[in-house]
Image (cartoon, rainbow, N blue to C red):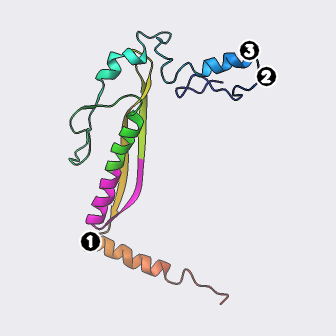
Amino acid sequence: MMIGAISNAYDPYPAQAGRGAANAGRAGMAKQGSLGGGGKVKKGYRSSPEDCETCKERKYQDGSNESDVSFKAPGHISPEASASAVMAHEQQHVSNAYQKAAEKGGEVVSCSVSLRTAVCPECGTVYVSGGKTNTAISYTDETNPYQKDKKAQDAIRYTGANIDYAA
């Protein structure tokens, strides 16, 4: 059974006495290696993941206007660590949104983080190529006349809406 990029094989029947040669073949397949095939060049690619120059030279850089997040200067992340590093970076943007909302009297209405993956054209390694954070913050402005009218209309509309007639 193939498990995608996590490992080459999965053996649901670990080596046990009495299993014979059939199980020995499966156990050897499970030890072959993870994430790259054990130094072998994948079919259709130029190099193995261990020797890939593209993966060694790949740099990540933040394109936002927030100055207090990581990767403002280009930095290298290995393909194996790219998912956790990019997610941690995007969480910094989420934290900044909550901090900005708290400072200005707003409320974070929604927040989502999405990660993009790609496949290295040289070695075939799957890695996280970037991420995006979307936040929506709602601010209430009590000095705005439209906001005052809306609040008054809401008071009229919702007064008595939750009455327990059985009591």
Spot occupied by residue 64 in the image (x, y as percentages of width and height) = 25, 42
User: Where does residue 154 sit, x and y in percent of width and height?
Assistant: 43, 76
Q: Is residue 143 magenta?
A: no
Answer whether residue 96 is magenta in the image: yes
**Quadrant in the rendering for residue 49:** top left
Q: Farthest residue toward the bottom?
A: 167
Q: In what quadrant of the picture does the C terminus appear? A: bottom right
Q: Quadrant of residue 17?
A: top right
Residue at 72% across / 28% down in the picture? 13
Q: Amino acid at mark 1?
A: Asn
Q: Mark 2 falls on what kind of element?
A: loop
Residue carrying label 1: 144
Q: CA distance from mark 3 to mark 2?
A: 9 Å
**Is 20 left, or right, of 11 in this rendering?**
right
Stretch of the chain drawn in magenta: 94-112
Residues packed near mark 1 inside 10 Å, few (<14), some (14 to 19) or many (20 plus): few
The residue carrying mark 2 is 18
Give the number of the disc on residue 21. Answer: 3
Q: CA distance from mark 2 to mark 1?
A: 81 Å
